[in-house]
Amino acid sequence: MKQPEETLFDYTVEQFADLQILRYRVPGFETLSLPRKKLVYYLTQAALEGRDILFDQNGKYNLQIRRLLESIYTHYQGNRSTDAFHALEIYLKRVWFSNGIHHHYSCDKFVPGFTAEYLSEVLQSLPASCIPVEKGETVKKMCQKLFPVIFNPSVMPKRVNQTDGEDLVLTSAANYYEGVTQQEAEDFYATLKTPGDSQPVMYGMNSRLIKENGQVKEQVWKIGGMYSTALERIVWWLQKAEQVAENDAQRKVIRLLTDFYHTGDLKTFDAYSIAWLKDTDSIVDFVNGFIESYGDPLGMKASWESIVNFKDMEATRRTELISTNAQWFEDHSPVAPQFKKKRVKGVSAKVITAAILAGDLYPSTAIGINLPNSNWIRSVHGSKSVTIGNLTDAYNKAARGNGFREEFVYSGKEKTLLDKYADITDDLHTDLHECLGHGSGQLLPGIDPDALKAYGSTIEEARADLFGLYYLADSKMVTLGLMPDSEAYKAEYYSYMMNGLMTQLVRIEPGCNIEEAHMRNRQLIARWTLEQGHDEKVVELVKRDGKTYVRINDYAKLRGLFGKLLAEIQRIKSEGDYESARKLVESYAVKVNRELHTEVLNRYRALHLAPYKGFVNPVYTPETDESGNITDIKISYTEGYAEQMLRYSHEYSNL
Ligand code: ZN
């Protein structure tokens, strides 16, 4: 059932460079209670206040460069329709997207499509008051400082350098270290660690490491320390959120977080993380802080991010239903009895609705969260794992009508199937994979869980995927009311095979093999079933007008093959059969058919689809009565990309 406004909702905003900007809906926000709406609102404000922190973390000149470009974009009175101005606009849009001057994914510095001469010319035409010089700095000095950073390819070329053998700290442009070598940084943190500490804090995660008068020391990110002005604003909103918290557990989470922002004490951060993962009853939830360390070549310093969300009741009901039937699924699987669990417990995956994305989750974002990152907390207390339903939904909806299906799907019959069912069957496959697949089966006594070594993760992902694929076609799914009818599973079978045999190759560089475990698992399953069903023509790769397509002739037999492979993969896992794992993965999962790869890349390129996507946020506006009390929070979805970025730079410019 579709709401009328849903069909009118435009999920795409704009496209430039290698980026597509999308918009997501926040279904269910309007029906939250007023206190919960206020809670969400205060937390979204706390999220947006941290934006400048990430720009600065990603590179020490990023904020000034952003402000310089924004000033030109807003005030330049000259000819705005030249190629050079257009290139400057694209450059700024990319800087916004990456929260800095390096590509958000490859980490390479952007190459501007305009010259240094053009930039100085434009700057000279601006009133001096519009140029964001630092205290005591002349415009000339600023240009001498920033122009090489923008234009010289050998200055700060990479945000995070991972090249083995180089000094990763000195050669990375990220702003986590200043004047220290990799050796000095490693030595500094090695001395902080206590041998045998079973509950170590995450040393170095909330500070910049610098050298001052020959002394290596930390500048801690806390109120009164580095980033104080932004953290004060965050805490101000967190305190408002605390007043409307849903329960004591949530109040404790917020209080520990504000304590941490005040003190920078990493023990407090651990206490906060534990309180956060234990708070599973609250409807509204959030992450706000220094979380992921991908931006530090040494993997210690954490970038700032925030997401505010609330439970998706409908989707959570779906995963709970799957989970409560876990034993039935285990008992009826095609796996040999000795490899089955006698007592299996399904996990109920929590599906959440994102209300705001910020910091390192904006505009480019994850579609799932599994935190905290502290190893000892994960092993002692566990972790909280959620998938973000409304973002996945927005990706799916935006992909409608972009030409991808028209190009790669065999015929109108399959396309109709996908249009009708693919969104729901894709979600259900993920649910089965997460709630049941990984938890199913057992190792034989005495088998080392790491016996499959480097092939372990591909085999494990294949096991979970196959469990899901096998059961999607089961009548139990219709009986439980999870699948609309007995035809729907075919949509997932088709898109899975098409992806595994062909279209996932768009993410592989020409001439390369497949390395990532999920991609390997998908090709393993697709190639193996293609080969096994060859004689009976269960699945075929067929050519039409020089283009290759996947055609499935017998869906029921394909299910049989999925079941057969599941039984074999489970045997390999249960017995720790390294040699069979190696053979399966090396024969089916790794190597790429060069000719097909080239064809797929060419066809994909011709569609002009942007490989990277990100989101603009909705806008939340409080409504108040005469005495200023909030009576409602309205949500709107009309803000454009540049409009939002400029507003954020104006309203949340804290550093
Ligand atoms: Zn998995």
Image (cartoon, grey):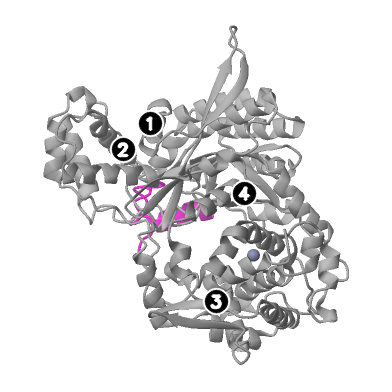
* Res. 99 in view: no
Q: Callout 1: few (<14), some (14-19), or many (20+) C-alpha neighbours within 10 Å? A: many
State which tag comes first along the sequence, 1 or 4: 4
State which tag comes first along the sequence, 1 or 3: 3
In this rendered view, identify the residue nearer to me: 594 or 201.
Answer: 594
- Residue 506 falls left or right of residue 565: left
Alpha carbons under labels 1 and 3: distance apart: 44 Å
Alpha carbons under labels 2 and 1: distance apart: 9 Å
Provide the residue designation for mark 1: 649
**Marks 2 & 1, CB-CB < 8 Å contact:** yes
Alpha carbons under labels 3 and 2: distance apart: 42 Å
Provide the residue designation for mark 4: 389
**Marks 2 & 4, CB-CB < 8 Å contact:** no
Q: Give the x, y percent position of residue 497.
A: 57, 74
473, above or below 650, in the image: below
Q: Amino acid at mark 1?
A: Ser
Q: Amino acid at mark 4?
A: Gly
